[in-house]
Image: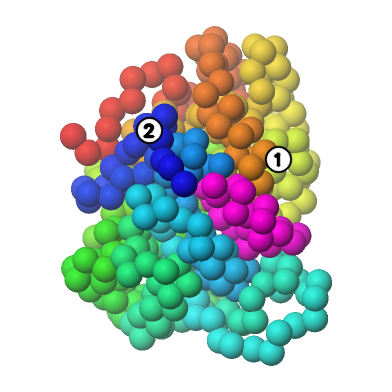
Amino acid sequence: MSLTSSLPRNTIGTTAVSVTALGFGAAGIGNLYRTVADEDAEKALDYAFRHGIAYVDTAPHYGQGLSERRVGANLPTRASLSTKVGRVLDSISPPPPGTERHGFVDGDPFEPRFDYSYDGIMRSFEASTARLKRDYIDILLCHDIGEMPHGDNAAHHTKIFLNSGYRAMDELKAARNVGAIGLGVNETGICLEVLPYTDLDTILLAGRYTLLEQGALDELLPECLRRKVSIILGGPFNSGILVGDNHYNYGAAPEDVVKKAKALGRLCADHGVPLPAAALQFPLAHPAVACVIPGMVSAGQVETNLELFHTDIPAELWNALKHEGLLHEDAPTPQDTKKPVVS
């Protein structure tokens, strides 16, 4: 496999770690919602690496280790990699074929268990490096902390992480087993809660700064700029609603979301631009955003995302989106000059 330099690279925080502006979200090749053949996963990764995508994000949660195994079997040493901690995988008897667990079909024979303690983080990291066949992880993220995954237990888990688990991540970085540390979450509130008590390099924020919603502009993104914390933007299509699917936030899209997505699509069509192209390119205009990582499961999807990433979009579209109230008036757009997070 060879890597090209056709995609721009951005630095993560103040570290030496860099990522391509377009990355590969590897939840899908963990059999998210449906099975993906080993061969198709291999082809998707190979196509991505050969066409300049040199950053992959995975996690133990994705297929209960399956995504990490597939990434580890195909990842070039020069590609940047992020994985996550916060869940420990306990061995179980293999479930019957076709079994779906936690959204993943035919995952590996492990059961995930939340553990944000020092020992839990270290155990998770050690298991991930074995599956990924790497001693060094470029970016290590604390996964799914906060109210959305934990509800009334959120404060309990956050306390354990801040009092124990964060120390493990900090030690791994200090020992140069990890290049950068951060959070991997779907909400802004937990980020604002954790930032004052940690020294993070990045936040993988899924779905909260997209063409559909820009609430992160109010507090989180300015705070990230102030602290020189880079954003890796996951879920740029908001679970599919911005590519013509009816899913939003991993579930059925509510009526108001469907209505806005259709309005965005009509305005994009009026300017001759595919809605997914605008959705993929928009987040990168913000100076805090280093990378956008759509999920991909096939070489065809990789090819499509590369085409969308390179689609020419007229300035008139961004102006029209703001004029129609479909885009936050203060949101930077690709027509604006983007300044680097780290000077």
Query: What type is the residue that disc 1 sits on?
Result: Ile
* Nearer-the-camera pick, 46 or 308: 46
Q: CA distance from mark 2 to mark 1?
A: 31 Å
Picture coordinates of residue 289, whole percent (x, y) = 39, 39
Camera-nearest residue between 47 and 197? 47
Q: Which quarter of the picture shows residue 95?
A: bottom right
Measured along the vertical axis of the image, is residue 307 above or below residue 228? above
**Residue 148 can be seen in this image:** no
Residue that badge 2 annotates = 5
Q: Residue at x 28, y 42 (%)?
A: 11
Where disc 1 sits, the SS reads helix
Residue at numbered disc 1: 241
For this rendering, which residue is in front, 83 or 255? 83
**Where residue 108 appears, x then y in whole percent?**
64, 76
Tell me if label 2 and label 1 are in contact, CB under 8 Å.
no
Q: Give the crowd class for mark 2: few <14, some 14-19, many >=20 residues within 10 Å.
A: few
SS assignment at label 2: loop
> For the residue carrying disc 1, how many other residues have a C-alpha within 10 Å: few (<14), some (14-19), or many (20+)?
many
Q: Residue 299's image quarter?
A: top right
Horizontally, residue 34 falls left or right of residue 326, namely right
Q: Amino acid at mark 2?
A: Ser
